[in-house]
Structures are given as structure tokens and as C-alpha cells.
Amino acid sequence: MCADFSNLEKETQELDQAGIDIFHMDFMDGSFVPNFGMGLQDFELVRSVTEKPVDVHLMIQEPSKYVEKFADLGADIIYIHPEADRQAARTLDIIQQKGKKAGIALNPGTSVEMIQELLPLVDYVMVMTVNPGFAGQKYLSYTNSKIEKLVALSKEYDFDVMVDGAISPEKIEKLSKIGVTGFVLGTSALFGKTGTYQETLEKLRAL
């Protein structure tokens, strides 16, 4: 969402060559969150120019209607918001039946207790550390306790803990020490910085 969309193919190639691990793509419907995100054509373009894993973050109502579509287009990881899906367990099962990794994304106001029954069904849990929908927001520090709870639970249920939202180098350094394994990078750490993407990533990995 934070890339230069005037030349998305070139951006994708440069990020790929710089050594990113996963391409993270936000899809918004203007209903579940007050904004609109990327389109299917954007996904298809990125998927066509990289062999790296591509994930989709479905910030949409009734994601069950679209998970098979994205799986067939080549998504490797599909995140849903349990708050937006009346049958979240079934949707996660569909994702895995398609041979894809299943993830849940938690809004800042969603507690661990509300989704704990889903943890045996997922490969990833992504904690939103801002209210989803817009780039450039301030990190919500009260989400730290939720992250710590999920890191502890990840050892029991075998999932990776990811964080998304205002992830600065300082946050990467702090959260990696408590067990977070993946960071979605936007304007706080990657885009719009001086130097190449490769130089930026090398600095972040050294933290």
C-alpha cells in the first residue's frame, strides 16, 4: 500500500532483489475499514513478477466470499479478520484446504480471548498496532500486552506472530526480542527512506 504505484512493477522487482521475505498486500472494501485498498489487477501484477511469497490482508466484510479467489490467483498466505466473518473457523479451513497458509489479523480493540479458540487453526496471527485502513498512523502502545500474550500462546499452538502498523526500527528491535517473528514494513521503516531498499533492509536485519 505504501509503494510507488506509478511504477508498481519496478517497485516489486527492486524489493524482490533487495531481499524482502514476503510481499504484503492490503485489500479494503470501504466498509470494514473506512478506506479502499488495492485491486485484483495490482495483486496479479505483483504475483506475476516475483516468486517470493505474497500474502493478502483482507480488511473486508465476509472474507469467505473471496479467499478461494485469492488462493487461485496465487496468494501464499491469506489473513482474515474474525470480526468480519460469522464463520471464521470454516473460512480458515477453506484457506488451508486450498493449500495456503491461514492467518488472522487482530484489530487494536480485539482481545486475545475473543479469538483464542481459533489459534489451533492458524499459521499466522498478525496484530494490528494501528487502527487499520490508513498508512502513517501512530503506534498504539497498548497493543504490546496483546503481543506478549500471543507470543506465549504461539509456543503452545505453533503459529508465527506478526505485527503491522507504524513499525519503526525501534519497534523492530524491541518486539523481536520478545518473540515477534515478522514485521510488516511501511513508511515508518522502509518506504520513502534515503538509500536503497537493500541498504535499508540490511540495517533493519542487523537490529
Image (cartoon, grey):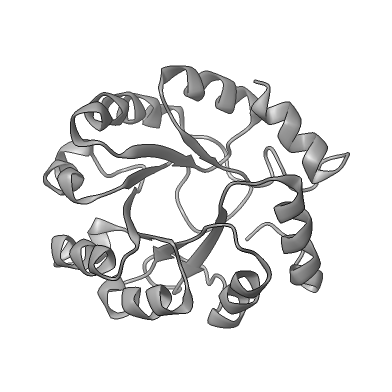
Q: Residue at x 31, y 27 (%)?
A: 151
Q: Nearer the viewer, residue 13 or 91?
A: 13
Indicate the position of residue 172 as horizontal and vertical percent values: 57, 27
Quadrant that contains the C terminus? top right
Up the image or down, 185 lies above or below 14; here it is above
Asked where in the image residue 167 lies, by quadrant, the reply is: top right
Q: On the image, which quarter does residue 114 sit in?
A: top left
Q: Quadrant of residue 96?
A: bottom left
Taking 4 as reference, is 33 left or right?
left
> Which quadrant of the figure contains the N terminus?
bottom right
The residue shown at (53%, 35%) is 139
Residue at the image point whose x is 57% and y is 72% from the top: 38
Residue 34 in picture, x, y percent from top left: 47, 66
Q: Residue at x 30, y 47 (%)?
A: 123
Task: Estimate the x, y position of residue 44 in percent, counting from the top left.
Answer: 58, 78
Q: Residue 95 or 86: which is nearer the viewer?
A: 95
Q: Position of residue 179 (x, y in %)?
A: 41, 23
